Image (cartoon, rainbow, N blue to C red):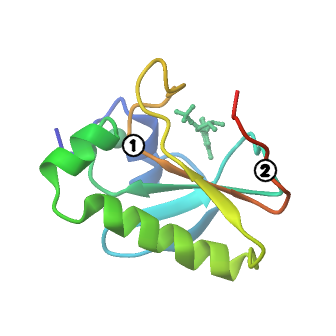
Amino acid sequence: MTDAASDCLFCRIVAGEVPAEIVHTDDHTVAFRDIAPQAPTHVLVIPRAHHRDAAALSASTDGGVDALVRAAVKVAEAEGLGDGYRLVLNTGQDGGQTVFHVHLHLLGGRAMTWPPG
Ligand code: 5GP
Ligand code: ZN
């Protein structure tokens, strides 16, 4: 499934039908601020095409995951996260995924702890 899903919140953000604070776009990705930030910088980077999770994206699109990471690194640089940041792909129920359009979390602006909850 790669076409925009009309019932998918993040496809609707890509289409401009749902407002979001967009911080970066390119041919393959859109990045916008998380509505419930868990760190001073919390940005979600998503592919323009609909894929439900990281497994589906990596299986169906050559370089799709790479495009997400490259966009996230650009945003991290633009946000001044030179001391480091965290990239997270929550995947499936046990991974804590709640929105089933794959998204890479970029978290930064504070020291992260480990292990995550
Ligand atoms: P997940 O739990 O699936 O890894 O992450 C989904 C993320 O999407 C959550 O961090 C949540 O705050 C964010 N989110 C949910 N709805 C919206 C929305 O309408 N707009 C934005 N900008 N973020 C959202
Ligand atoms: Zn979608």
- Give the residue pinned by disc 2: 112
Most foreground residue, 49 or 65: 65
Residue for badge 1: 102
In the rendered image, residue 11, in percent from the top left (x then y), is placed at 37, 45
Vertical placement of 3 versus 116: above or below? below
Question: 114 or 18, which lies in front?
Answer: 114
Q: How crowded is mark 1: few (under 14 residues within 10 Å), some or many (20 or more)?
A: many
Look at the image and tell me in which quarter the N terminus lies. Answer: top left
Give whichever of 88, 51 is nearer the camera.
Answer: 88
Label 1's element?
loop
Foreground label between 1 and 2: 2
Q: What residue type is labelled 2?
A: Met
Element class at badge 2: loop
Residue at 27% over, 39% down = 55
Q: Of the two numbered discs 1 and 2 on the same chain, state the one appearing first in sequence.
A: 1
Q: Does the residue labelled 1 lie within 8 Å of ligand 2?
A: no
Tell me residue 117's x, y (percent): 70, 27
Amino acid at dot 1: Val
Crowdedness of circle 2 by 10 Å Cα count: few (<14), some, many (20+)? few
Q: Taking 81 as reference, is 30 above or below it?
A: above
Q: Report whether 88 appears left or right of 16.
A: right
Q: How far apart are marks 1 and 2 (CA)?
A: 22 Å
Q: In which quarter of the image is residue 92?
A: top left
